[in-house]
Image: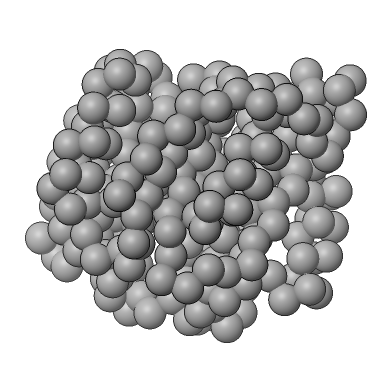
């Protein structure tokens, strides 16, 4: 059963109200991910980030997420994903981006992550992904995108990633995700995100993806075969965010999703 949630509750989360006007980093952490190790890299330029990604690939890590915020690229890696080969593509034109995705799919790659930053659409692709029949969809209006979510749910797909930029709402839909059911919510203010997430945790859902999309927080949840322990945190400064990551690593969590936004 899929659910669409549109609640707006009021509770202040983690950062003082005076800091809310500035951009901040958001991290989602989880246990029981199947990962065996993790790393991340940051870079001011996409070209430098690509070099760092290749270095991590050479160390045996696979790329699981990319985020652009505060004029900084962050790439997130893990071991134990099951991916056998990966590729990274970027295009400035969305239609050409979709064409490139289709070309890679013919080579056995599936799109697993989409990000937009510095005028570029970024796609992370992988061979060996458990997801099947991954579809990349983009719509000009949010209402049309939400209709597309419902249509894909009816056809047996789950929403695994979302991104909004340049006036488009985009999403990745896949089969064979292992999700039992799915839900999403759209929240205007970051101070309301905490209650939304905690309410879904109580209902047995876990976070799939958080995005700051068109000045709103778009959160995807899924009911997993086995509930896992999760946490989330935010920091305005990158060094504070690094310390938060280290803190959760020490507690046995892995960083599964990175986002940035503002209240």
Instruction: Identify the image's colour scheme: rainbow, by chain, secondary structure or one colour.
Output: one colour
Who's the residue at 78% across and 18% down the image? 21
Locate residue 89 relative to residue 75 in the image: left or right.
left
Q: Residue 54: in sight, yes or no?
A: no
Residue at (59, 53) in percent of width and height: 201
Q: Residue at x 22, y 59 (%)?
A: 175
Q: Is residue 241 left or right of residue 185?
A: right
Quarter location, residue 37: bottom right
Please tell me which residue lies in front, 171 or 156: 156
Asked whether residue 151 appears in the rendered view, the answer is yes
In front: 75, or 228?
228
The residue lying at 79 percent from left, 36 percent from top is 13
Q: How many numbered marks have been drawn onto this rendered protein structure?
A: 0
Is 168 above or below relative to 174?
above
Camera-side residue of 6 and 256: 6
Which percent across, then down, holds residue 134?
Answer: 21, 54
Residue 226 horizontal/vertical position (percent): 47, 73
* Residue 174 locus on image (x, y percent): 24, 55
Q: Quadrant of the C terminus?
A: top right
Q: Position of residue 29 (x, y in %)?
A: 65, 60
Is 123 situated above or below 61? Answer: above
């Amino acid at each position: 059963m899929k659910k669409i949630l549109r609640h707006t509750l009021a509770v202040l989360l983690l950062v003082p109200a005076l800091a809310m006007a500035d951009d901040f980093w958001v991290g989602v952490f989880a246990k029981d991910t199947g990962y065996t190790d993790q790393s991340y890299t940051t870079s001011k330029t996409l070209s430098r980030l690509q070099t760092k990604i290749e270095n991590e690939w050479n160390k045996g890590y696979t790329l699981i997420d990319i985020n652009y915020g505060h004029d900084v690229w962050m790439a997130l890696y893990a071991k134990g994903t099951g991916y056998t080969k990966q590729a990274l593509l970027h295009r400035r034109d969305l239609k050409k981006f979709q064409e490139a995705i289709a070309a890679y799919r013919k080579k056995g790659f599936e799109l697993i992550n989409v990000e937009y930053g510095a005028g570029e659409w970024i796609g992370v692709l992988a061979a060996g992904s458990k997801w099947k029949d991954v579809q990349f969809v983009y719509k000009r209006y949010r209402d049309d995108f939400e209709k597309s979510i419902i249509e894909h749910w009816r056809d047996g797909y789950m929403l695994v990633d979302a991104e909004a930029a340049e006036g488009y709402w985009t999403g990745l839909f896949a089969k064979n995700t292992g999700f039992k059911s799915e839900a999403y919510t759209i929240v205007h203010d970051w101070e309301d995100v905490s209650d939304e997430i905690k309410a879904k945790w109580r209902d047995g859902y876990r976070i799939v993806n958080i995005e700051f999309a068109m000045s709103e927080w778009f959160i995807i949840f899924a009911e997993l075969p086995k509930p896992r322990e999760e946490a989330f945190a935010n920091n305005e400064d990158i060094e504070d965010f690094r310390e938060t990551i280290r803190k959760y690593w020490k507690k046995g969590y892995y960083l599964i999703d990175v986002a940035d936004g503002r209240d």
